[in-house]
Amino acid sequence: MQWTTTRFVLDLHRPQVMGIVNVTPDSFSDGGTHDTTKAALLHCETLLRDGADILDIGGESTRPGAVPLSLAQELARVLPVVREAVRLGAPVSVDSYKPKVMQAVLDLGADIINDIWALRWREPDAVAGEPDAMAVVSRHVGCGVCLMHMHREPRSMQLEPMAGDVVPQVRQFLAHPAQMLRSRGVKKERIVIDPGIGFGKTVAQNFALLARQRELLTLGYPLLVGWSRKSSLAAMGGSAETLAAQQRMVPSVAAALLAVERGASVVRVHDVRETVQALRVLGALE
């Protein structure tokens, strides 16, 4: 099994670690830590030294309640980092849902588009004939794409979380954009899916997705999972009010290991070094 991207073909027989690079002042865990180009690039280099296989660069916070960022602001944050990061010798993913950002970073050589909207978002001021997110990705010669499930949108997703059995709903949701891409000629090897842990789901629903994760694999696409520092990890210990996001490393690593055991091919994490070390232990058993 492999993931074909712009410049790299990733071997998914070994779990891939995607290191998070938030070029934001307001992300839920590390907002403001890497919000300059210099700081973000230094963090990219640190993540690669720690063993990251992929860098995931994002310029807009999508935490619950986050206010959308303007196109100009996102481009100003992301483009200088991507321009330099593509020279570091590792796959570069960009976390964005805006078609113009996608096109701009792909023009710079980015390898993967990681979209929380699963290519559904539309520019409010788009003119007739302007390519939407689905068109930008499908017209590219070979970028990888990650399609994520999100209930509602960041400002409202936790105000009214999903109801009912989450697993078949997520599975059905993700099947649609994947099939739309395939119908436009995008090869299956370019597509990865993400259940969207925490994006409009209750704590119980998040853990149901982990427990029954293999049901999502029946769609036939590799699975990318992002449990890193999510509030559900603190809530399970009864300490959601006191366990800050930066203090959730141990449960984050545990969740990443459980996700890989249940078939995840890529784990998106803040704590790269610790996750890589834990995966080496798991790999020794296998």
Image: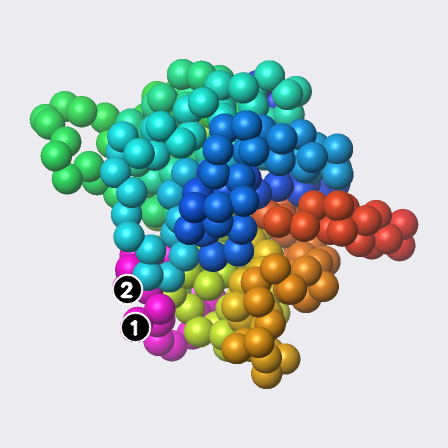
| Residue 117, magenta (yes or no) | no
Residue that appears at 76% across and 51% down: 274
Residue that appears at 64% across and 64% down: 248
The disc label shown at residue 160, or none: 1
Snapshot quadrant of residue 131:
top left
**Mark 2 residue element:** loop
**Mark 1 residue element:** loop
Q: Is residue 90 visible?
A: yes
Front-most of residues 285 and 218: 285
Judge left or right: residue 28 versus residue 44: left
Dot 1: within a 10 Å radius of its alpha carbon, few (fewer than 14), some, or many (20 or more) residues? few
Magenta span: chief secondary structure: loop
Judge left or right: residue 206 versus residue 184: right
Residue 49 sits above or below residue 142 on the image? below
Where residue 51 appears, as percent x and y from the top left, is 75, 37
| Residue 166, magenta (yes or no) | yes
Residue 12 sits above or below residue 166 on the image? above
Where residue 103 appears, as percent x and y from the top left, is 34, 23
Front-most of residues 283 and 232: 232
Give the residue type at disc 2. Answer: Ser
Residue that appears at 62% across and 41% down: 19
Boundaries of the magenta span? 149-168
Q: Is residue 134 visible?
A: no
Residue lying furthest right: 284
Judge left or right: residue 1 versus residue 6: right
Q: Which residue is mark 2?
A: 156
Are the residues at dot 1 and dot 2 in contact (C-beta closer than 8 Å)?
Answer: yes
